[in-house]
Amino acid sequence: MAVETDVLDELRRLRTRIPRLTGSLAATVDGLVLAHDAPDTEPEGLAALTAAALGVAHRMTDAAARGDFRELLVRGSGGYVATYAAGATAVLTLLAEDRVNVGRLHLEGRRSGARIADLVATHVGPGTGRHADRPVPAEHLAAAPPATARPIGTLPVRTPQRPTHQPRPQTGI
């Protein structure tokens, strides 16, 4: 069974557990849709915006020295958008009405994020392509990323370079 089907099943179960939940989306941290249960919403656009917000949230938690990203909650006049980490490579975004029980939203969102992280970790990639249903080999799960790699979802930081030549002094101005 493909990871998309498993994740979609989890999203549908989530809708039954949270009253006033209007939609849900699981995506990679790069903004690719894994699965969605969000009627009246463009899932690709929401996944892209989630990836952008995730990058900002990572930078904010780093700048404030608050550790790794866990969740992001945005409240608008019509309801909530909540984003939860689902492992290192995926995120879960929930859409809810204004009168949702926010405590319940957090509780179920965190649980589903952990389940989705497990589902994604047992498959190669986001579930697309010819190797989507193949389990990840054990040596890939145990391999640590190189020390120079930055965590997925963080923005690169540009460091200024020293010029290789000395500028000529300007005369006759």
Image (cartoon, grey):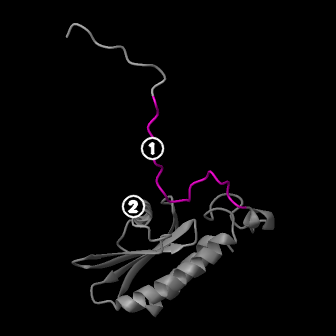
Mark 1 or 2, which is nearer the eye? 1
Quadrant of residue 150 within the rendered picture? bottom right
Q: Position of residue 122 (x, y in %)?
A: 70, 72
Q: What amino acid type should be assigned to the residue bearing mark 1? A: Arg
Q: Position of residue 89 (x, y in %)?
A: 57, 65
Inspect the magenta stretch and tell me whether residue 147 lies in it. Answer: yes
Drawn side of residue 22 relative to residue 3, left or right: left
Element at badge 2?
helix
User: 173 above or below 102?
Assistant: above
Q: Position of residue 30 (x, y in %)?
A: 50, 58
Q: What amino acid type should be assigned to the residue bearing mark 2? A: Val
C-alpha span from label 1 to label 2: 16 Å
Return the mark for residue 96.
none
Residue found at the very far top of the displayed protein: 172
Which residue is at a point 55% across and 82% down the rendered structure image? 10
Residue under label 1: 158
Q: Earlier in the sequence, mark 1 or mark 2?
A: 2
Evaluate whether residue 37 shows in this view.
no
Element at badge 1?
loop
Residue under label 2: 56
Q: Position of residue 151 (x, y in %)?
A: 56, 59
Q: Quadrant of the C terminus?
A: top left
Q: Which residues are magenta?
A: 144-162
Evaluate whether residue 116 shows in this view.
yes
Which secondary structure type mostly characterizes the magenta part of the structure?
A: loop
Q: Are marks 1 and 2 in contact (CB under 8 Å)?
A: no
